[in-house]
Amino acid sequence: FPTRRSSDLGDTGGVQQDEANLDAVLKAAEDAGELHGIILVANGRAPRFTEHLRYVLTKLRSNVPDVVMNNFVAVMTNCTELTVTFPMQELEVFKPKSIRHMDNTFFHRNPQSLSEGAAREARNEWARSLATIQEMEHDLCEMHGTSTDNFKVLRESRFQIKQELHSVRGEVEKLQIAYDALEAERADRKSVV
């Protein structure tokens, strides 16, 4: 499968960086022409679910067309299914076709510096990670390619809505100015009488 790695979302760069990264992700998806799957990779051992992470997931979900959601896979890293602490209910809006777990500590240390027992555990962990990758590959093979035209339609619709909202806001401001002028005139008339 051809893959594209997206920019990080919910990282330390803050909301503005997330906005720029999300735009890059959506542009890459739109330019791909066809999408077999979206793989969301999240730290399954996140110590807490923050409002910022909730914002990122909500923003991501609201920018992915419904038709693409049939091709969604979640991968929880740094955990197993048993040790995951990420609140999995937060992923329900994505309707993931599968949720996988990878405890990928293999790269944390130089394998030559490990004791025999730790090296054996690292090899077992590596084998489990490779099996998970094969399972994800199987998931992706079962998914049907989806046109990414809907990303463009969604982006253009959002732009039109923003333009309309801006126009309506301008009209409301004009009405508020007219109302304020009428109220001022009414107050002046009362003070004369």
Image (spheres, rainbow, N blue to C red):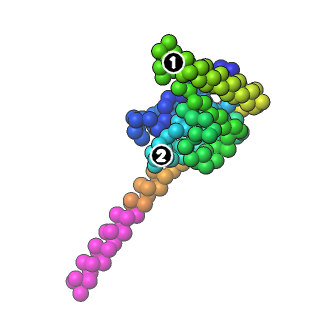
The disc labelled 1 sits on which kind of residue? Ser
Check the image and report above or below for 156 versus 27.
below
**Which of label 2 and label 1 is nearer to you?**
1
Q: Secondary structure at mark 2?
A: loop
Which residue range is magenta in the image?
175-193
Work out which quarter of the rendered image holds the C terminus and state it. Answer: bottom left
Work out which quarter of the rendered image holds the N terminus and state it. Answer: top right
The disc labelled 2 sits on which kind of residue? Arg
Residue occupied by mark 2: 48
Residue located farthest toward the front when viewing the structure as drawn? 116
Q: Secondary structure at mark 1?
A: loop
Would residue 190 be found to the left or right of residue 175 on screen? left
Residue occupied by mark 1: 115
Sequence-wise, the earlier of marks 2 and 1 is 2
Q: Quadrant of residue 147?
A: top right
Q: Position of residue 105 (x, y in %)?
A: 53, 26
